[in-house]
Amino acid sequence: MKTKLSLLSAALLGATLTLAPIVSQAAIPLAVGGETVPSLAPMLQKTTPAVVAVAVSGTHVSKQKVPDAFRYFFGPNAPREQVQERPFKGLGSGVIIDAKEGYIVTNNHVIEGADEILIGLHDGREVEAKLIGSDAESDIALLQIEAKNLTALKRADSDKLQVGDFAVAIGNPFGLGQTVTSGIVSAMGRSGLGIEMLENFIQTDAAINSGNSGGALVNLNGELIGINTAIVAPGGGNVGIGFAIPANMVNNLVDQIIEHGEVRRGVLGVLGQDLTSELAKGFGIETQHGGFINEVMPDSAADKAGIKVGDIIVSVNGRKIKSFQELRAKVATMGAGSKVEFGLIRDGDEETVTATLGESTQTAEAAAGAVHPMLQGAKLENSNNSGVVITDVAQGSPAAASGLIKGDVIVGVNRSKVKNLKSLKSVLEDQKGSVALKIQRDNTSIYLILR
């Protein structure tokens, strides 16, 4: 591992920056051969030292049930499960956001399960990093190193980004060394991709490849506008569709991790869906963007703020939103106790309400597949301590095969009551063989069998 990172750090020092040409008024003039040509080199000289290589190593632990036929030969004391350990190594990128404190932001999936995290700095130094905290649902992790003479990126206001703004991606693709690519902001507020539980991505056509995860997406001023996270790659390579977590979303999460050591997720207490043209027409409104509120949980932050069923939330803190998924991501990445201003349309009139977000009891580890194999493909969310809501079900998934549909609320397992994700996970861990989920569907209670 040490040798591999040393080679990577050496590559960082000798890397050739890959830069697609951009010609614009915002480009920085550079004299080459006596002539002035547009170049991003001056900006990159100040920016690239803040982007680091992240090398990780660890051990994956998996458990496999020992078949009864085999256990018969070893007697009653034979183990019920076989534990297998498999070492792994990985490479990614990170961004220094605080030079004095040594804070580095990367993706959670880059460092997840790692026993050792080594940082390769731009000047060739290798430093061991400490994990301060992470959030699997938004895919953000905060690391800390002890080192002098660090360079940090200033963070921009990502809510001010517009489609067409220039964007530059900096990272460590394929372990080749630091690489720079450029493009534009292709779209804002991308969600519903199934990449993460909380999605509100910046989409860019700046080339992002494997190893770029956790790297920087910057504007032409060299300010951080997002953390590169994922790509659409049907053939396994870059096709010009990459996604980054907005800087403002990163700021909210990092501030919580620094203060509490974890993300204390805010909760509004509503269920809803994207505003469709049919709904807009039915309600006689012209806007085509926003979050339509189907249900308001009793005594929730939304209920106390006066948000009602049928309201259409169109802005958060004065910033317009496109969808319910964007609303959900913005709220969930704000800390519990945050005061948030919501712009909404009610009966054709525009109104503004202020809500103080409640605190979520949802655990970061509660991915549906980890709760039970036959729940894989379902998105789970707490329902105000009265069950677990199925907010989405992937077509053809084990959850769909189990009979679950969007809107179902899991309220029990066999004879045990389920209040939230934590209790659902706890109950299912103690069950062997088939289990019966008690589901509240509309106004009817039904049972579904998980095998």
Image: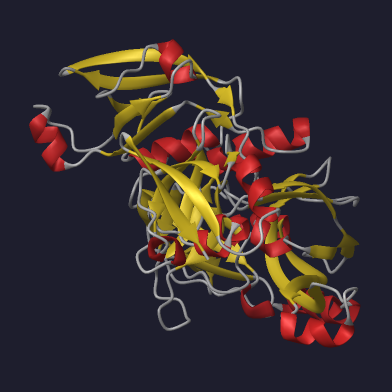
Q: In this view, does 66 lie above or below 279?
A: below
Picture quarter containing residue 337? top right
Of residue 218 and residue 241, the one placed in the foreground of this image is 241
Q: Where is residue 228 in the image (x, y as percent from the top left)?
A: 55, 59
Of residue 138 and residue 304, the one placed in the foreground of this image is 304
Q: In this view, does 319 lie above or below 342?
A: below
Res. 371 in view: yes
Of residue 267 and residue 214, the one placed in the foreground of this image is 267
Q: Is residue 225 above or below residue 281?
A: below
Q: Residue at x 38, y 21 (%)?
A: 342
Q: In this view, does 377 lie to the left or right of 373?
A: left
Q: Is residue 346 above or below residue 319?
A: above
Res. 220 in view: no
Of residue 396 and residue 30, the one placed in the foreground of this image is 396
Picture quarter containing residue 422? top right
Picture quarter containing residue 12? bottom right
Q: Is residue 289 left or right of residue 95?
A: left
The color scheme shown is: secondary structure
Q: Where is residue 298 in the image (x, y as percent from the top left)?
A: 44, 18
Q: Where is residue 21 in the image (x, y as percent from the top left)?
A: 43, 70
Quarter of the image with the N terminus is: bottom right
Q: Residue at x 35, y 64 (%)?
A: 395
Q: Position of residue 55 (x, y in %)?
A: 78, 69
| Count of numbered badges drawn on the protein | 0
Q: Residue at x 53, y 71 (%)?
A: 32
